[in-house]
Each structure stands twice: as C-alpha cells, then as structure tokens.
Amino acid sequence: MSYAYLAAAIIAEVIGTSALKASAGFTRLVPTLIVLAGFAAAFFFLSLALRTIPVGIAYAIWGGIGLVLIVTISAVLFREIPDPPALVGFALIAAGIAVINLSSGMAAH
C-alpha cells in the first residue's frame, strides 16, 4: 500500500507543479488553488508512504518519476522540448532509481 501512497503523492505533485506555470506567479486564482491542493495532497500521501518506505528511497522515486512526468507534460503542453544533453541527464536519473530499487538493500520491498 505504501507504493500506492507514493504514486498518489507523485501524481498530486505533478498536478501541482504543472499548475504553477498557469498560476502566473500566483496571480490567477484557480491555478493557484490547484497548486496548493496538489502540494498539500502530495505531502499528505508522501507522509503515509514514509511509514514503511525509507525517506531516501521514497524521495528518489518521487523525484525521478516526477521529473520524467513533468518533462513530458512540459514538452506536450508548453512546447518546452528538452535537448539531447537534458535527455541524457534524465536517462541517468532513471537509471539511478532503477539501480537503487533493483539492487540496493536499502529499498523497501
């Protein structure tokens, strides 16, 4: 169940982060409310996930998956296309998360 909570935290954070651009520096009410709700939900679900998942592992997964989702959403919605070096960096982050989860004794399974 902890990984379901972590997934909910990641989705909520991605929604909140995606709404940040639309909030125009918190000058638009509806996107600002989405940002606030997204981050509140993200931290709530992250707190539930941290009951059994080590904080370093949870944060690595959150950061890595969140990064991939935000880059994808930014490319599609905002036409912010990453260049090849950025894509290499994203791939390295994803590889690091895979190594931690598949090989490290630190990861909770």
Image: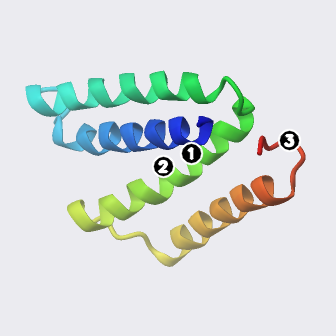
Of the pair 89 and 17, the residue shown nearer to us: 17
Task: Look at the numbered discs 2 and 1 and tell me whether their residues touch, using CB distance below 8 Å.
Answer: yes
Q: Quadrant of the C terminus?
A: top right
Left or right for 67, reference 98: left
Nearer the observer: mark 3 or 1; the answer is 3
Q: Is residue 28 visible?
A: no
Query: Residue furthest toward the bottom?
Result: 84
Report the residue marked by disc 3: 106
Report the residue marked by disc 2: 66
- Disc number at residue 63? 1
Answer with the quarter of the image where residue 73 lies: bottom left
Query: Residue furthest toward the front?
Result: 1
Answer with the quarter of the image where residue 70 lies: bottom left
Which amino acid does the dot numbered 3 rest on?
A: Met
The Cα–Cα distance between marks 3 and 1, rounded to whole angstroms, is 17 Å
Q: Position of residue 15 (x, y in %)?
A: 31, 42
Q: Residue at x 73, y 35 (%)?
A: 56
Q: Position of residue 84 (x, y in %)?
A: 51, 78
Mark 3 or mark 1, which has the lower sequence index?
1
At numbered mark 2, what does the secondary structure look like: helix, strand or loop?
helix
